[in-house]
Amino acid sequence: VAFVLSFAHLVEPIPLALLVGAVTFHELGHLLAMRLRGYRDTSIFFIPFFGAAATGRKQDATLADELVVLLAGPVPGLLLALALTMLPVMAPHAAWLDEAIVLLIGLNGFNLLPVPPLDGGRVVQALLAAHAPAVDVAFRVCAACALLLLGWVADSVVLQMLAIFQGAAIPSALREARLTSAIRAEIARVDM
């Protein structure tokens, strides 16, 4: 309810209903993938003014598990948009259909941008962090700067706030990278 109310003053009722539907469809994709991959305690929560998130946990999640879950939100949304483009051929044209297609492409395409905390950024992060924690830290710095610049150019407080949140996570990522390097060095020393 808080999520809907946070957008109610900005968006007309039909586009708002489409937004809620698109966000819910996106998060249900993540949720279904988590459940199929054996995640526990799965749920979806809506964040006023921002969007939504699907959560779950799996102790032994592999990189493949993580990638499947991350892509299970935006990919089905883009496929649904593609399927909806075929509807006008089979049915009379409705104005809301164009809005739904644009919204699905915009929401899911934006979500695939390689900027954390978006799904695309988390995919890149998962691939980088798996083998090169220092590169992950550099990526986080670049992502925070890109979000800040994009927020400034688009005059978007939401994007600027995401940049600040991303920037605030950099010190802990740096500590984690140092710890990972120290552990790898110790393991290499013991193996010799």
Image (spheres, helix red, strand yellow):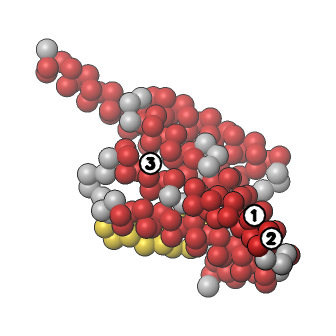
Amino acid type assigned to the residue bearing label 1 in the image: Thr
User: Helix or strand or loop: what does disc 3 sit on?
Assistant: helix
- Residue at left offset 50%, top offset 58%: 72
Res. 149 mark: none
Q: Marks 3 and 2: CB-CB under 8 Å?
A: no
Q: Marks 2 and 1: CB-CB under 8 Å?
A: yes
Mark 3 vs 1, N-terminal side: 3
Q: CA distance from mark 3 to mark 1?
A: 27 Å
Quarter holding the N terminus? bottom right
What residue is shown with label 1? 85
Q: CA distance from mark 2 to mark 1?
A: 7 Å
Q: Residue 184 occupies which quadrant of the picture?
A: top left
Q: Nearer the viewer, residue 135 or 56?
A: 56
What residue is shown with label 2? 88
Amino acid type assigned to the residue bearing label 3 in the image: Leu
Quarter holding the C terminus? top left
What residue is shown with label 3? 67
Q: Is residue 164 visible?
A: no
